[in-house]
Amino acid sequence: MGVFAAIGRSDLLNFRRDSMLQFLLIYPFILGGILRWLLPWVQSGLQTSIGFDLGEYLLLIVSFFGLLIIPQLSGLLVGTFLLDEKDQDTLTALMVTPMPIRVYALYRAFTPALITVLGILVVVPFINILVLPFEQ
């Protein structure tokens, strides 16, 4: 567990230096806020102006923006870390440390999965259009 904490501290330092990565952290909330407050307004506007009911497609829209964008963003975040580490030859330096490369690969695979699950559990209820019971 100490190895994961050390790599996590290094990632946190890299994260604090890069403003684009910081924006990726708040982007799902920006998108969720747009969906939460703009989508009902668009739905009522379409209903009154051309008679198109967007209600049938709300689950599809929320699924796309809430469930598909977040994994893409977490993959982008980890991919950016990997590119930075490749540019700085960090991966070569890791080969001579006592930490097995499998542990590092496990960390890099587990991190986006954890970010994705936590992001979905936070952002989808924040959108508050279609909230399923937590058990489902």
Image: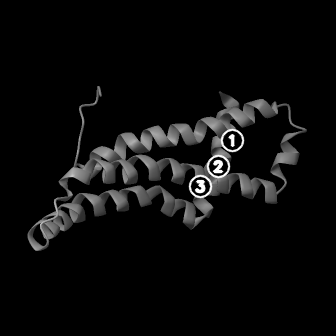
Query: Label 1 amino acid?
Result: Ile
Residue pictured at 25% horizontal, 52% vertical: 58
Res 18 quadrant in image? bottom right
Mark 3 vs 1, N-terminal side: 1
How many neighbours does mark 3 have within 10 angstroms: few (below 14), some (14-19), or many (20 or more)? some
Q: Position of residue 1 (x, y in %)?
A: 65, 27
Disc marking residue 11: 2
Indicate the secondary structure of the residue bearing disc 3. helix
Q: Secondary structure at mark 1?
A: helix
Quarter of the picture holding the C terminus = top left
Q: Is residue 110 above or below residue 42?
A: above
Q: Nearer the viewer, mark 3 or mark 2?
A: 3
Real-space Cα distance between discs 2 and 1?
6 Å
Dots 3, 1 in contact, CB < 8 A? no
Do the CB atoms of the residues marked 3 and 2 lie less than 8 Å apart? no
- What residue did someone put label 3 on? 76
Q: Residue at x 81, y 30 (%)?
A: 100
